[in-house]
Amino acid sequence: MAGNTFGKLFRVSTFGESHGVAMGGVIDGCPSGIKLDFKEIQYELNRRKPGQSSIVTQRNEPDKVDFLSGIFENKTTGTPIGFIIYNKDHKSDDYKHIQEIYRPSHSDFTYENKYGIRDYRGGGRSSARETICRVVAGSIAKQLIKNITITSYVSSVGDISVNKSYKDLDLSKNSIEKSIIRCPDPEISEKMIYKINKIKNKGDTIGGTITCVIKNVPIGIGEPVFNKLHAELGKAMLSINAVKGFEYGSGFLGTKLTGSQHNDLFYSNGKTETNFSGGIQGGISNGMDIYFKIAFKPVATIMKKQKTIDKHGNVIFMEGKGRHDPCVLPRAIPIVESMTALVLVNYCMYKKLSKYSSF
């Protein structure tokens, strides 16, 4: 299986299955001499871990990371950073009923057809548990680009949306984290939580969107043509489980405007009056805020009977079992931020913009 490595200069390779012994990875290319804040790394993992509220899966995992190499006296040595997170609360028996069944909208069918074998326990390698490794690497990347701030929040659940610009919201950590759905609009947050619980009680799931805002990105990040900044961000976001769409700046709403309405006119200092470009022009950052939105589908495992087929082509009915998220959005926030940090740290290292980083 290829495709387990992300990045070029700051590279992370991950391994492990949802119901295997452990998840883990190797970070290659991290500069030496970086003093790491391990509490901050664990904080990010805690934001992603299961069982943190009533609206996520109740799988009980401590998600504590152990570093195996590449760090000495709390500083990076420049050698590969190996890390591991042991799986503690996997209940593989919950999946025995699908050993020969292809679950609707899962990777069961495609994995078995491509590889001739699949790990049916929680989806194996295709499980979103793999993203825990991205959060470890992303939290380290964040510490390398400290002057750049990356903030994400849940902006919609089903048909309930935050109808305010990010500029009109309190995007402080306290504002976002005090809501279990991680939405900074208190009124909308309560409606979202009510909606998720209502869907959960019916044995169903629901999707929505996450908005990410990046501030203090220096001018000149990104490469023209095939390595455009927004293209790399799009690839990173679309690699996250359950993501179905990505738009930056004005996105699809921009198609309803004329050129004269959409153009970002300059001030004398190089800033622009508007920011429909989303902080990126020609694939290169222009110094304005970068903002984008990611669409997440409803979780595919539902506690309702659905028609499907088994490996022999027989049409049957199945019902989900075990512990699953009724909505992935609150746990996806640190994953979105981590993948964003991994994209940015690679560009910062490539450009050697030490003015904007800690290395």
Image (cartoon, helix red, strand yellow):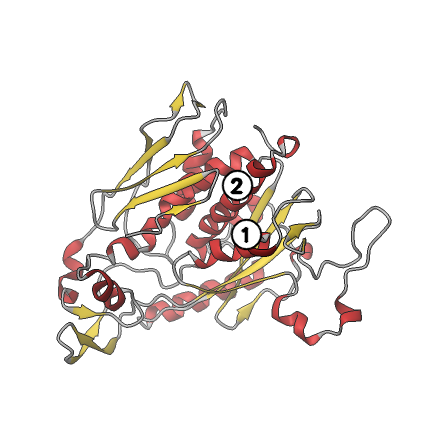
**Residue 152 shows which numbered tag?**
1
Please name the amino acid that badge 2 sits on.
Asn
Question: Of 31 and 45, which appears nearest the observer?
Answer: 31
Q: Residue at x 50, y 25 (%)?
A: 34
Q: Given the current orientation, which residue lies at the most extreme front position?
A: 225
Left or right placement of residue 140 versus residue 25 in this view = right
Q: Position of residue 108 (x, y in %)?
A: 24, 65
Q: Given the current orientation, which residue lies at the most extreme top position?
A: 73
Q: Is residue 4 above or below residue 98?
A: above
Callout in the foreground (1, 2): 2
State which quarter of the image contains the C terminus: top right
**Residue 346 shows which numbered tag?**
2
Q: Residue at x 33, y 36 (%)?
A: 64
Left or right placement of residue 129 versus residue 250 in this view = left
- Say which element carries label 2: helix
Question: Of 156 and 121, which appears nearest the observer?
Answer: 121
**Residue 1 shows which numbered tag?**
none
